[in-house]
Image (cartoon, rainbow, N blue to C red):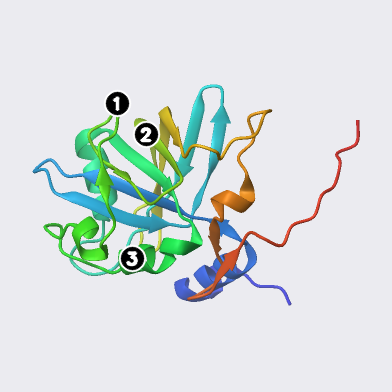
């Protein structure tokens, strides 16, 4: 099968991408608006961009309706700060509850029952239930497309890591079993990170 994306509906193209590029890690992003309203939302277009300096990237998509820009992006544009919280399976349902389309005055921390705790460097709070939090300062916004289902790449420099005690081994690696992170598949399907195998890279 050969598919020319220009001949297909945008949702069909989205389904091809989201069904092929998997599993995708989840950036559970906390922000605060210019008016002080807390916001919490998950994004599965998420990756590492650099380790020196530590830069992570996620991409809020353009949605339909009269508010095409996600509140997360609006808040980051206004404040230049955010926190990425890694999502573990034990609070996956609460994470999923924040994925709905809510008015900007809604505090998703209160809505989901998750616990905000103060960050050290940035104003947006961290998610207490998360075992790993990354406080970020905005590094760069890269507008990719303003079209429906387009997006803006958000690049943030990690200025503080918060890692739950006992999560890091003697060589500085995160214990994947203790982290128990989840990933996004297509549609409503998620994946656990417990089924793993090793391959040594060639010298």
Query: Image quadrant of residue 194?
Result: bottom right
Q: Nearer the viewer, residue 61 or 122?
A: 122
Contact, CB < 8 Å: mark 2 with mark 3?
no
User: Label 2 belongs to which residue?
Assistant: 135
Q: Residue at x 32, y 69 (%)?
A: 97
- For the N terminus, the image quarter is bottom right
Along the polypeptide, which appears first: circle 1 or circle 3?
Answer: 3
Q: How many neighbours does mark 3 have within 10 angstroms: few (below 14), some (14-19), or many (20 or more)?
A: some
Contact, CB < 8 Å: mark 1 with mark 3?
no
Along the polypeptide, which appears first: circle 1 or circle 2?
Answer: 1
User: Label 3 belongs to which residue?
Assistant: 99
The location of residue 105, given as percent across then percent down, is 11, 57
The location of residue 25, given as percent across then percent down, is 54, 54
Q: Is residue 41 left or right of residue 104?
A: right
Q: Residue at x 55, y 60 (%)?
A: 183
Q: Disc 2 and disc 3: Cα gap in Å?
A: 21 Å
The location of residue 19, given as percent across then percent down, is 60, 70
Q: Nearer the viewer, residue 130 or 134?
A: 130
Q: How many neighbours does mark 1 have within 10 angstroms: few (below 14), some (14-19), or many (20 or more)?
A: few
Q: Nearer the viewer, residue 165 or 22?
A: 165
């Amino acid at each position: 099968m050969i598919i020319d994306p220009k001949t297909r509906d945008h949702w069909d193209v989205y389904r091809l991408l989201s069904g092929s590029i998997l599993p995708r890690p989840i950036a559970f992003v906390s922000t605060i608006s210019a008016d002080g309203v807390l916001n919490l939302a998950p994004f599965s277009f998420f990756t590492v961009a650099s380790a020196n300096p530590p830069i992570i990237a996620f991409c809020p998509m353009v949605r339909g309706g009269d508010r095409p820009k996600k509140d997360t992006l609006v808040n980051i544009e206004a404040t230049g700060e955010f926190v990425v919280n890694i999502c573990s399976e034990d609070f996956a349902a609460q994470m999923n509850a924040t994925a709905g389309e809510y008015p900007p005055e809604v505090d998703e921390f209160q809505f989901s029952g998750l616990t905000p705790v103060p960050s050290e460097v940035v104003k947006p709070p961290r998610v207490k239930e998360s075992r790993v939090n990354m406080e970020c300062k905005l590094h760069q916004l890269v507008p990719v497309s303003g079209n429906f289902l387009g997006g803006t790449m958000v690049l943030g420099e990690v200025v503080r890591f918060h890692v739950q005690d006992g999560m890091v081994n003697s060589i500085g690696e995160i214990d994947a079993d203790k982290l128990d992170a989840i990933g996004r598949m297509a549609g409503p399907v998620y994946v656990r990170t417990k089924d793993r195998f090793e391959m040594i890279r060639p010298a």
